Amino acid sequence: MNKKKVNVLMGLIMITAIILTACGSATSGPADKVTVQLSWFHGVEYAGFYTAVENGYYAEENIEVVLNAGGPELNPLDEVANGNAQFGIGSGDGLILAEANGQNFVSVAAIYQENPLAITSLVSDEILKPEDLVGKTVGTYSLDLSSYSDLMFLAFMSRTGLEQDSMDYALIEDFFGA
């Protein structure tokens, strides 16, 4: 091999060594602690977060991630606004309501491309179409449908032409148990 090729090869090896040293896995300083407020109790919908923690993906980036469970009485956006979390897993309707209330958030990722919420009933109730809900009792998070969790149901009623006073409402707060 001629001298010019050896010099080029040695230069490339040195540059590669410098880059690899700079990109090494050793971390400098303590990990950045990040709290993520989940919108619901710990469950399968957050599997991506749990997998990243368990496999050390966050740790590789020198990030310590804390995943706080949510529930029906907890608004993840409030937890972010109050400084209790740096990120919150919320909903599009929750962001709209927050904006209407003067809060300013940025959506950085979509976990679901379509909202997975559904209205369910027993087969014996014979509720097959939206109009079949008229005169029935529907479980909601607030009796006046003011909860951000009830916004999707209000949108459903608007879209299907159902009137808010065409059915009765019952709180589902005890549904989840204590």
Image (cartoon, helix red, strand yellow):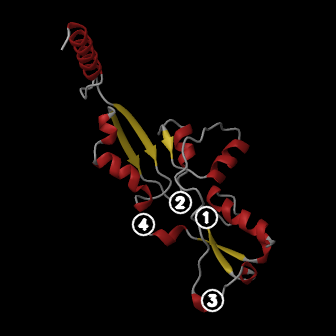
Q: Nearer the viewer, mark 2 or mark 4?
A: 2
As displayed, is residue 61 above or below residue 7? Answer: below
* Label 4 Cα crowd, 10 Å radius (few <14 / some 14-19 / many 20+): few
Q: Is residue 23 left or right of residue 80?
A: left
Q: Quarter of the image holding residue 65?
A: top left
Q: Can you identify the residue that label 3 sits on?
A: 125
52 or 125: which is nearer to us?
A: 52
Which quarter of the figure is the N terminus placed in? top left
* Horizontal arrangement in the rendering, residue 54 relative to residue 150 (left or right): left
**Mark 3 or mark 2, whichever is nearer to me:** 3
Distance of mark 2 from mark 4, alpha carbons? 12 Å
Q: Residue at x 67, y 79 (%)?
A: 137
In terms of depth relative to the viewer, which is nearer, 106 or 147? 106
Q: Decide which of tag 3 and tag 2 comes sooner along the chain.
A: 2
Q: CA distance from mark 2 to mark 1?
A: 7 Å
Looking at the image, the residue that sits furthest to the bottom is 124
Give whichever of 171, 33 is nearer the camera: 33
* Residue 141: assigned label: 1
Query: Residue 70, position in %: x, y?
Result: 47, 54
The Cα–Cα distance between marks 3 and 1, rounded to whole angstroms, is: 21 Å
**Mark 4: amino acid:** Ala
The residue at the point 72 percent across, 84 percent down is 132
Occupied quadrant, residue 142: bottom right
* Helix, strand or loop under label 3: helix
- The three-letter code of the residue at mark 2 reads Pro
